[in-house]
Amino acid sequence: MAVSRGFKRAWDALTRNEAAPGLVLMACAAVALVLANSPLAQSWHGLFNDPLGWTPVPKLNSAHLWINDGLMAVFFFVVGLEIKREILDGALSDARRRRLPVIAAIAGMAVPALIYLAITHGDPALHAGWAIPSATDIAFAIGVLALAGKGLPSSLRLFLLTVAIVDDLGAVMVIAFFYTTGLKLVWLGISAVILVALIALNRFNVRALTPYILGAIALWYTVLHSGIHATIAGVLAALTVPLALNRQHDSPLLRLEHALVAPNGFIIVPLFGLANAGVHLALPEGGSLALPLGIALGLLLGKQVGIFGSILLAERLGIANRPKGATLPQLWGISLLCGIGFTMSLFIAGLAFPASAILVEEAKLGILGGSIIAAIAGMIVLKRSKNAKD
């Protein structure tokens, strides 16, 4: 009993620490990197990629597929819940408050993609990876921001969160529209029926969680077989969950989000890091520098130019004001942190090059290199910016 209470206290303390999910993810990525470059590399790769002896879903016949197509659907479900809450009752609900982060997020996705395409223009086989450096890893970035210490205005954290949420929404749209192939209309039709049923539950003010959870699982299964990536089902199902508060100031969306945030940050995303971050720290035989260089520079330079440049331009033109109390050096540091792509970038890399393990490995090198440098540079700039003025 005492052990149980002690574990609960430790778990509660861990989940209240906003830096913790990012630190756990960093630790898992480090473990995957070390093992992928050790004598255990083959066994480590086999652990996630060898066929399973039995699976309830034949399409998912390895641990890697279950993590990327199964557990990551839960990750995207949480993303969908966050997006809906922010749009209806958060930082994205006020046009004045959302203007700057939306502009910054769009520019922060477009410029890295352009830099990537400029570097890889000579090889059409690499063009499919244009979206890889456009992503921001919210857990990793928030973790590094927390490590930068106290003394920074709270508006910076809200700005980073809002940019990352808009970035996540953009990534979901990119996956849906640019990385969907071979549609199967029967499965797509069944998915549409299930989605309409979930919307009907919302319209009829059904507040019990069970119908939404069962509907989300059914939607995931049908979307998995439809040709659209299964994680999109997570977002679509999340958008049907009611947010309207009852007399106890509670709602199904808030209950689900509260229940899933900790498992998402401390189980699902770390498992994804373990399964996907392991890369041999050398170019694969026959590989080239164009792909990792395009991704690394897209993350490191593209995010800076896109986000920080759009902040300066928006302020100069009077379109939007910078976050309250934030200095330009601090906003530069935040722009650097947005160059931490990691989770979403690794995910998109697998979608961009599904038939080439070599290209995925090259992409991982660029993602890890660009993200690590962006994290270190961003933390240094933020630490030095506490006493700096514009």
Image (cartoon, rainbow, N blue to C red):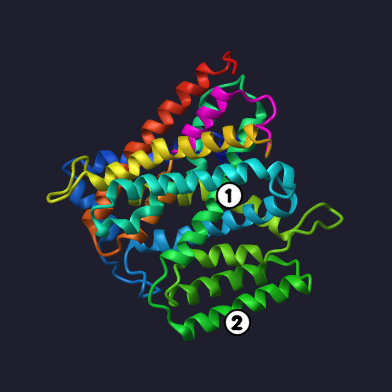
Quadrant position of the C terminus in the picture:
top right
Q: Is residue 165 above or below residue 214?
A: above
Residue 342 is situated, as x and y percent measured from the top left of the image, at 41, 44
For this orientation, the residue located farthest to the front is 317
Q: Earlier in the sequence, mark 2 or mark 1?
A: 1
Mark 1 element type? helix
For this orientation, the residue located farthest to the right is 247
Q: Crowding near pointer 1: few (<14 within 10 Å), some, many (20+)?
A: many
**Residue drawn at (26%, 38%), measured in percent from left and top?**
34
Residue 293 is situated, as x and y percent measured from the top left of the image, at 28, 41
**Residue drawn at (44%, 48%), measured in percent from left and top?**
134
Residue 80 in which image quadrant: bottom right
Instruction: List the residue tagged with mark 2.
Output: 193
**Residue drawn at (46%, 68%), measured in percent from left and top?**
230
Q: Identify which residue, 164 or 266, lies in the foreground.
A: 164
**Residue drawn at (27%, 60%), measured in percent from left and top?**
49
Task: Indicate yes or no whether the magenta region holds residue 267.
Answer: no
Residue 175 is situated, as x and y percent measured from the top left of the image, at 46, 62
Mark 2 element type? helix
Amino acid found under the numbered disc labelled 1: Val
| Disc number for residue 242 | none
Instruction: List the residue tagged with mark 1.
Output: 166
Q: Identify which residue, 247 or 175, lies in the foreground.
A: 175
Q: Identify which residue, 298 or 58, lies in the foreground.
A: 298
Segment colored magenta: 320-339
**Disc 2/disc 1 C-alpha distance (Å):** 28 Å
Amino acid found under the numbered disc labelled 2: Val
Is 194 on the left-hand or right-hand side of 148? right
Is 340 on the left-hand or right-hand side of 79? left
Residue 235 in which image quadrant: bottom right
